[in-house]
Every structure is written in C-alpha cells, then in structure tokens.
Amino acid sequence: MLKLKSGQVRRWWLRLHRWLAMALGIPLAMVALLGSALIVVKPVDRWLHAELFNVAPGPAAVDLLEQARLRISGEFGPAATLTFRPPRLAGESLRVAVRGPWNGAIYLDPRDARELGRRGEREGAFNLLFEIHSALLMNEIGKPLLAVLALAYFVLLVAGVALWWPRRWRQALTLTLDRGALRALFDLHRAGGAVLGLLIAVPVLTGAYMAWRPLSQAVTSLSGQPSKLSPQVPKLVATVQGTPLDVMVSVARARFDGAPVGYVQVPASPSKPVRVRLLLADDPHPNGLSSVWFHPQSGAVLETHRWDELDPGARGYAVIYPLHTGELGGLGHTVLNCLLGLALVALCGSGIWLWWRRR
C-alpha cells in the first residue's frame, strides 16, 4: 500500500512538471534567452553607437543638468518625467530618460549640453530586447506575468527535484550515454536540472522581485516594519522661483561626503519631490539607493535616506538587482548569469523534446 501511494505521488509530480513546462516553458525560455542576450548585446550596442555614449574628456558645464532640464521640458512639456544619469567616468555622455508624450533616451555632451542623439525606448536591438525581457512589451501589465513565470519555474524546480530524488545517492548523477541519444538526453535533463536548478533560480526569482513591486511590499509587511515612502511636498506660493537641479545635486553630495551621483529623478507632477540617488561606497547597488529628496520649487531638503536605513523590501533591491544583472560578483558573475540563462533554455528545450519523442 505504501508503494502504491508513493507511485501515485510520483505520477502527480510528473504530470505537474510536464504540463506546467508545456504551458509556460516556452515563454520562460524566451525570457531567459533574452536575459543572456542582453549581457552580450549591451557592450556591442555601446560599441556600435559610440557617438551616443562617448565624448571627448573635458570639464562639465556648471549648470549642465538645469540646461538639459529646461531644454527637454521645453520640448516635451510639463507632462514629461525626466531621469538624469550624469557621467560617472571621464568621457561619458549625460543620458536623460524621458517618460511622457515621448518615451526614450536623449544623450547630451556634458561640456555644453549639446544633443548627441536620441533613441525611442524600443529603438535598436538592445532597447527592444530589454523591453521584452523586462515587461514582455506590455509595460506594467507584463510585470506580474513575469512574476507568474518565476513562480512557474519554482514549481517546476520542486517537481523536478522530487522526480530526480534518488533511492541510491551513488547513482544520483549517473549519465547513461551508450544507450541512444534519447536516454542520454533524459539523463542530462534530469541531472542538469538537479545540479543547476537552484543556481538558475537566483536570476529567475530576483528578476520577478524587481519586476513586480508587490513582492517587495510583501517583504516589508511580513517584517512588521513600516514602508519608507517618498516624502510629501508642502505647497508653496506660485511666485517662488525654482532651484536649479545642479544646486540640488551639490547639496545632496555634501550630505554624503561628496558621493558620486547615480540618478537624478524629476517627476512631471509638481506635487512630487525631486530625488537625487547617490553611490555610497558600502552600497552594493551599482546605481545607489541612498537618496536626498528635495522640494521641486524651493529646493529645500525634505528627507535623507541611507540605503541601509530603508524598509526591508526596498533595502533588498541593493543586493537583488546586482544579483540579477551579475554586477555583484564582477565579470565572472556576469558570465555565470549568461550561462545560467542558456542552461534554462536548454532544460526547457530538452524537456519539450523528450515529451514529443515519448508521446
């Protein structure tokens, strides 16, 4: 009776693993393949479009950000949200992401704010691949779907491990390569999934965490700590003159001992604060999560947040983002993530092929 029950459980795991893979394996493999492709395409894109990313070294204009803001806001109007990425190395351009009547990036020479070029958010191979990988070309609607794919992978992993779990551990990773290609592929799929499954889970689950914000909110809720939201902007009379962005950045850097700037985020709504993100030496996030929040008109500092003082859900991004992109462990980690994406594609493809041949 016990053997019968064990066999029934195994058949249940097999059906779950098989039909979940058939239903969601192809989109899961596609997202994984695109993630690996992005790692390769990114440096190629920078090389092919060097005129957008590179400029001759020289001192930046003292009012660079304010010049850029006035010019871009004048073109797209007050409905556009702007995110500035100041140069971090000598010879880099200033990049401004625009969200509003037009979505894309504008590249400027930091010496005089001269425009070098612009690209729409889906223009060019890298941008298009990124939009598919990060949101399935469906903007906010696609992000919870990515979370569903990540959950599907987790269930596939559990079911696969349950099917693989050996009775004799000496045979756990045995490969039979002399009994035909189908048997060899089955053993490779079975052993490869067991060995690489947990490693593949890292980029898959971290991607879901970044894509779907309710996951980080749930982490904070479970911790019992309050969420640390952006500060409220007090109303001012209309006659108050706006403070230049470059002044806000100088104040923000002074708050953190001259730390370099990651991003400057200027929302379209005057009721939302300007955010300056900074790269602290102890912050593992490559773009920095420490922030100084400013009143968009007066330039008064509203709040200052160190990355390690954020709520648990938000603080998690400091490690989860570089884990997903591979930047946490340098070049070796980046190459590993690329290979793990290809391994997931191979597992999905071999599983579907095995099912097809054994029908």
Image (cartoon, rainbow, N blue to C red):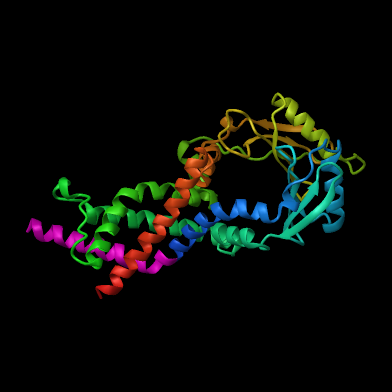
Q: Residue at x 44, y 51 (%)?
A: 339
Q: Is residue 87 above or below residue 141?
A: above
Among the 4 quarters of the image, the one containing residue 119: bottom right
127 to the left or right of 150? right
> Considering the image in quadrants, where does the C terminus appear?
bottom left
Q: Residue at x 30, y 73 (%)?
A: 356
Among the 4 quarters of the image, the one containing residue 247: top right
Q: Residue at x 50, y 55 (%)?
A: 36
Residue 167 seen anywhere in this rendered image of the structure: yes
Residue 81, magenta (yes or no)? no
267 to the left or right of 142? right
Residue 151 seen anywhere in this rendered image of the structure: no
Please provide percent x and percent y for residue 229.
63, 40
Q: Nearer the viewer, residue 1 or 317?
A: 317
Q: Residue furthest left?
A: 1
Please provide percent x and percent y for residue 290.
64, 33
Tag count in the figure?
Answer: 0
Query: How would you classify the magenta stretch by its main secondary structure?
Result: helix
Please provide percent x and percent y for residue 178.
19, 62
Q: Residue furthest front?
A: 178
**Part of the protein shown in magenta:** 1-26
Q: Residue at x 58, y 61 (%)?
A: 129
Please provide percent x and percent y for residue 271.
77, 46
60 to the left or right of 261? right
Q: Is residue 275 above or below residue 196?
A: above
Q: Residue furthest top?
A: 257
